[in-house]
Amino acid sequence: MIDDGGRAMNAYAELARDLWRAADEARFFALPDRERFFADLGDRVEARVVELIPAFAGAAPSGEPARCRDLRLRKAKKQAEEVAYQELIFSQSVVEPELEYAS
C-alpha cells in the first residue's frame, strides 16, 4: 500500500494498521492522515528491529555453518520483532483507557 506521500507501507505498517482497524474501526477511520501515520509507525518498528537483532543474535561462534547462522539470525529477528511490536504497536492502545475496563 502507498501512503499519501507516495511511500509504500512496509509489512510492519500493514500489521499495525490491520490490528488497529480490528480493535476500533470508528477511531481508526477518524485518525487524521492515517496512511502516513502507519507508514511512519512501520518505519519506526523496522528501525527498532534492525537495532535489536545484533543483541539477540550475539556473536557468531567460530566456524559456524551457514545453516546455523541463518537459523540464529532468523530467531534473533523474530525476538526483535516481538519486542518492537510490544514497544511500538501493542503499547499504543486505540481504545480509550477509561473504557478498556468499563462494563
Image (cartoon, helix red, strand yellow):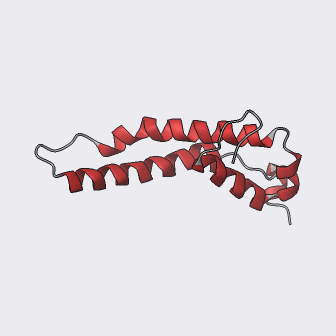
Q: Position of residue 4 (x, y in %)?
A: 77, 37
Q: Position of residue 55 (x, y in %)?
A: 35, 39
What residue appears at the point 69 percent right and 48 percent down from the top-left corner? 1
Q: Residue furthest top?
A: 5
Q: Position of residue 83 (x, y in %)?
A: 50, 47
What residue appears at the point 81 percent right and 58 percent down from the top-left corner? 24
What residue appears at the point 42 percent right and 39 percent down from the top-left corner? 52
Q: Residue furthest front?
A: 6
- Name the quarter where the C terminus is drawn: bottom right
Q: Residue furthest bottom?
A: 103
Is residue 12 rendered to the left or right of residue 32?
left
Q: How many marks?
A: 0
Is residue 86 rendered to the left or right of residue 40?
left
Q: Position of residue 46 (x, y in %)?
A: 53, 40
Determine the image quadrant of residue 71: bottom left
Is residue 76 rendered to the left or right of residue 46?
left
Which is nearer the eye, 82 or 66?
66
What residue appears at the point 63 percent right and 54 percent down from the top-left corner? 15
